[in-house]
Amino acid sequence: MQAEFRQRREQFMAKIGTGTAILRSAPTAVMHNDVEYNFRQDSNFFYLTGFNEANAVAVLAPHHETHQFVLFVQPKDRDKETWTGYRVGVEAAKEQYGADEVYSIQELDEKLTQYVEKADRIYYHFGRDHNFNQKILNLWQRLIATYEKKGIGPIALEDPILLLHPLRQSKSASELSLMRKAIEIAAEAHNLALEMRNPGRYEYEIQAEMERLFRLRGGLGAAYPSIVASGANACILHYTENDRQMQDGELLLVDAGCSYDYYNSDITRTYPVGNRFTEEQRILYNLVLTAQEKAIAQVQPGNPWNLFHDAAVRTIVEGLMHLGLLQGDIEETIKAEKYKPFFMHGTGHWLGLDVHDVGIRQIGETWQSFQPGQVVTVEPGIYIRPDFQPCEGQPEVPDRWRGIGIRIEDDVLVTETGHDILTAAVPKSIEAMER
């Protein structure tokens, strides 16, 4: 992988030219009092370096004579490592991560200026470390104040993500291999959930067994807080309490993914609790499934981003009108978004190092087109809360439809000739959901 990290840095440095990019590692996060969450590196930092420790800084200075890639890391410290774990340290970091120079993080203030003072601009993303944000701002202000005397130095401070994120959008073969592994593990867990969705079980039982598999198969754990939502809980998009007992005749919506070596999967299935769907559940499930299939068909190289969402929306609106749950002209209903009480979210998002991965969808009025190597989720849904309120002028929803929430989500790779449904190992047909 070090060869790939080096190639990524070279691609990025070709874009910044005579500028200098400064990247800060992710901060540690406190769970409660003095107990911290497990550390998770900033995705941009990891993408360019592969370095997975906190309190680090990466500097990319392609214009520098000898040091184009510089790391500032925590030094070895026997006492601190006893408490918080081993550190790579300065000497090993240079060898393991291919940096031209590595310094202790304590030397940052002393050494950083030499990599910035001859750059024409600084690339830095203002993140959650407010003290470090101020440090970079102060550095830039100090250097620009001397520009009229020296005629050299950074005259601009720009965000690197506009250059970096397009590189992250198209996944390499090694990235796709890691994503396929994350998907393989999550698929096994979802198929286990399908077998476990019996009346009387608790939502957390499903969650526990799925997340056990994530770790047992070598994953880092859940890619995001797992959603295991039975009954009306399935109408809450980001429900995470997962503490309700499942009842016969309900639905169980499971939205859970695995993180493997920092790459993520994201899968949703909706099962009948017990053996079979009710008539209303079956009708709405089939409608969501049809909408998803039509949306996936639009995930093609060259197709603009909005087409797959538009396909899902139109299918759902037509189906709800056929059922009498929506009424009026189809085009006007879509334009006025009168369907949104039933389907209030987008049809998908980019997937990769981040679950909601980086990438531009739209520039002004122009939608960006799908390109080979991109991975997108496709996840339409219908949600009818027990206290459902239709848009003005729309019919009331009969009680028999209320309390039903359905979402079906797959991870789809854009290929040279079409698409590949990476999550196809998780069944979703009505026949597969029933037993």
Image (cartoon, rainbow, N blue to C red):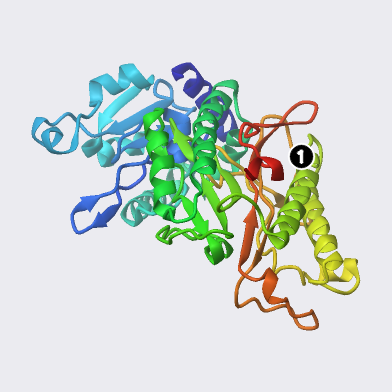
Which residue is the site of mark 1?
Answer: 299
Does any portion of residue 363 appear in the rendered image? Answer: no
Give how far across and how far down residue 37 sits, in percent: 29, 48
**Occupied quadrant, residue 33:** bottom left
* Side of 103 relative to 426 (left or right): left
Give the residue drawn at x 49%, y 31%.
185
Q: Residue at x 42, y 35 (%)?
A: 214
Judge left or right: residue 62 versus residue 348: left
Could you tell whether 369 is left or right of 359 in the image? Answer: right
**Side of 381 relative to 335 (left or right):** left
Kindly identify the residue that appears in the image at 70 percent across and 45 percent down: 430
Image x and y of residue 67, in percent: 39, 24
Locate residue 434: give its quadrant: top right
Q: Amino acid at mark 1?
A: Val
In this view of the protein, which residue sits in the foreground, 250 or 132?
Answer: 250
From the image, which quarter does the C terminus lie in?
A: top right
Query: Helix, strand or loop at disc 1?
Result: loop
**Compared to 282, does 296 lie above or below?**
above
Is residue 30 shown to the viewer in this render? yes
Extreme residue toward the left, this view:
79
Residue 138 x, y percent position in the rendering: 36, 53
Q: In front: 258, or 208?
A: 208
